[in-house]
Image: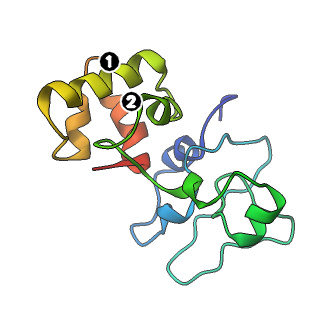
Amino acid sequence: MPVGARVVDAIGAAGGADPAAELNRLNLAAVVQDAAKIHVPLPGEPASSADGPAPGAAVNEATESRNPGTGSSAARKINLNTATAEELDSLPKVGPVLAKRIVEWRQQHGPFAAVEDLDAVDGVGPKMLETLLPLVTV
């Protein structure tokens, strides 16, 4: 994986997640570290590790107590219809200009009916949409 790659990029490079995988338990926006193991849990499977959380690991109460401010919101999807430009800017490959375009599109056209409608925003192409799909919701 190239420097700066995200967990979502690594999962895609590995051929995608198993359909039963609980991707919502991962921080798909976490930056992948060299030699890191990314475990994608299945339903009912614990996401804990003796070495502490890996990049993308599910955030739990123990993680929060060691890393205040990282809480479960890091594992939540960003709602395209309610997110601020600052929240959208936190997504991988979305900078302040594109975040502003997304908010402006929403103001001009109304709420997004589906996540896939994001491709109507100038600057969001197929690759960008593929990256954002697991990270956003409507």
Residue 80 in picture, x, y percent from top left: 32, 41
- Horizontal side of residue 80 vs 34, given as left or right: left
The spot of residue 92 in percent (x, y) is: 52, 33
* Mark in the foreground, 2 or 1: 1
Taking the image as drawn, is residue 124 in sight? no
Q: Nearer the viewer, residue 24 or 39?
A: 24
Depth check: give the residue in front, 17 or 22.
Answer: 22
Outermost residue toward the right in this view: 51
Q: Residue at x 49, y 56 (%)?
A: 76
Q: Residue 109's quadrant in the figure?
A: top left
Residue matched to label 2 = 128
Which quadrant of the figure contains the N terminus? top right
Q: Mark 1 sits on what residue?
A: 123
Proximity of marks 2 and 1: CB atoms separated by less than 8 Å: yes
Q: Secondary structure at mark 1?
A: loop
Along the line of sight, the residue nearer the viewer: 22 or 66? 66
| Residue drawn at point x = 80 percent, y = 47 percent | 35
